[in-house]
Amino acid sequence: MKPFVKWVGGKRQLLNQFQNLYPDNFDIYVEPFVGAGAVFFDIIQKYKPKKIILNDLNNNLINLYNDIKLSCDKTGEKRSRLIEKLLEEYIEKNKDKLN
């Protein structure tokens, strides 16, 4: 998994540097400014935090993450084609608000 939106100030290029700063393990992950979520997606692939708290000042972006969370099945399996399509439509419809 990787970020599904392009975000100003994205940290995708810095992930290799950040990985040395991650703790060995943890149960709770808090992301105060999730943006496109590069660090978030990197963390959840390497660790399995029991609790994840995502936040951002952009309410539309947080609503998008919540919609995806509610649309995914409870087993955490890969998103279905329908969810992918809904995500693309949501981003296209709200791209001015998301940026």
Image (tube, grey):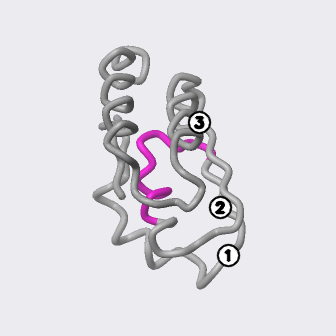
Q: Position of residue 63 (x, y in %)?
A: 57, 28
Q: Quadrant of residue 90?
A: top left
* Residue ID for mark 3: 66
Q: Observer-nearest residue: 2 or 78?
A: 78
Image quadrant holding the N terminus, namely: bottom left
Quote the CA–CA distance across marks 1 and 2. Answer: 7 Å
Q: Residue at x 43, y 64 (%)?
A: 42
Q: Observer-nearest residue: 63 or 75?
A: 75
Q: Is residue 82 left or right of residue 70?
A: left
Q: Are marks 2 and 3 in contact (CB under 8 Å)?
A: no
Q: Are marks 1 and 2 in contact (CB under 8 Å)?
A: yes
Magenta segment = 32-42
Q: Secondary structure at mark 1?
A: loop
Amino acid, disc 1: Phe
Is 50 magenta? The answer is no
Q: Residue at x 38, y 29 (%)?
A: 86
Q: Secondary structure at mark 2?
A: strand
Of the residues under marks 2 and 3, which one precedes in the sequence? 2
Task: Say above or below: 32 vs 74.
Answer: above
Q: Is residue 44 left or right of residue 55?
A: left
* Residue ID for mark 2: 29
Q: Residue at x 53, y 38 (%)?
A: 65
Q: Observer-nearest residue: 22 or 76?
A: 76
Quote the CA–CA distance across marks 3 and 1. Answer: 23 Å
Amino acid, disc 2: Tyr
Frontmost of labels 3 and 1 is 3
* Residue ID for mark 1: 26
Of the residues under marks 3 and 1, which one precedes in the sequence? 1
Q: Position of residue 41 (x, y in %)?
A: 44, 58
* Mark 2 residue crowding within 10 angstroms, few (<14) / some (14–19) / many (20+): some
Task: Say above or below: 80 vs 8.
Answer: below
